[in-house]
């Protein structure tokens, strides 16, 4: 049985600030992110199954990722918990979607956050192959399962 990879692309807008950073990104700023999630599995072999020939219905892949990852991050401000203080309290009063996380919200760490989230959602027989997150049109971070075994 051959394993096949299926990929879904997502877009979201997110703001962040890098705590203790020595450049302009220490200030709140936003990006138009593009996320690629690739899963691998064996296509359904049962011709009586409505998912015959599919590893996973793309609609199901979209539903799996959209709520817990894309909708969670979309139009939010993400900051590292070390930045929490009076000024962040004021920001929280002004905006609904402020996420204080246990990591510096770099593109690299956002990828690891997304990987962890997706791993918790996978059904048996599906494996996470890769995650690629573009922070700008020309800059991205990526994670591959093969590099992390």
Image (cartoon, rainbow, N blue to C red):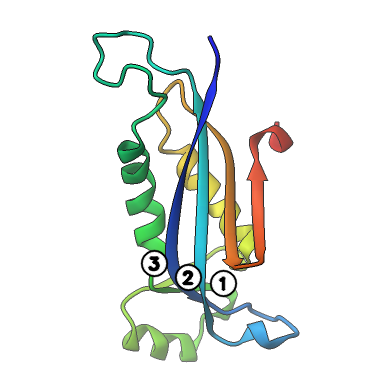
Q: Residue at x 40, y 58 (%)?
A: 70
The residue labelled by disc 3 is: 74
How many discs mark residues in the rendered view? 3
Answer with the quarter of the image where residue 27 lies.
bottom right
Rendered image quadrant of residue 10: bottom left
Is disc 1 placed on a helix, strand or loop? strand
Residue 105 in the figure: left or right of residue 123 = right
Above or below, 112 against 20 in this view is above
Query: How far is disc 3 from disc 1 in space, using C-alphas?
Result: 17 Å
The CA distance from mark 1 to mark 2 is 6 Å
Residue nearer the viewer, 92 or 16: 16
- Residue 145 lies, in percent from the top left, at 64, 35
- Against 29, is 101 above or below? above
- Between the C-alphas of marks 2 and 3, the distance is 14 Å
For discs 2 and 3, the disc positioned in front in the rendered view: 3
Task: Measuring from the top left, give residue 50's x and y in whole percent.
Answer: 24, 19
Q: Classify mark 3: helix, strand or loop.
A: loop
Can you identify the residue that label 1 sits on? 80
Instruction: Please report whichever mark, 3 or 1, sits nearer to the chain's N-terminal start.
Output: 3
In primary-sequence order, the first of circles 1 and 2 is 1
Residue 113 x/y as whole percent: 54, 53
**Which residue does the numbered mark 2 point to in the structure image?**
100
Q: Quadrant of the C terminus?
A: top right
Q: Secondary structure at mark 2?
A: strand
Contact (Cβ within 8 Å) of mark 3 with mark 1: no
């Amino acid at each position: 049985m051959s394993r096949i990879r299926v990929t879904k692309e997502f877009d979201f807008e997110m703001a962040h600030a890098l705590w203790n950073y020595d450049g302009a990104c220490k200030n709140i700023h936003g990006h138009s992110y593009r996320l690629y999630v690739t899963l691998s599995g064996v296509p359904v072999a049962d011709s009586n199954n409505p998912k015959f020939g599919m590893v996973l219905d793309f609609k199901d892949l979209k539903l799996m990722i959209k709520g817990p990852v894309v909708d969670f991050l979309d139009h939010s401000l993400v900051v590292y918990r070390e930045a929490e203080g009076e000024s962040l309290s004021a920001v929280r009063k002004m905006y609904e979607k402020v996420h204080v996380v246990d990591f510096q919200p770099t593109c690299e760490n956002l990828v690891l956050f997304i990987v962890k989230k997706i791993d918790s959602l996978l059904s048996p027989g599906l494996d996470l192959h890769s995650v690629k997150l573009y922070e700008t049109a020309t800059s991205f971070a990526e994670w591959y399962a093969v590099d992390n075994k």
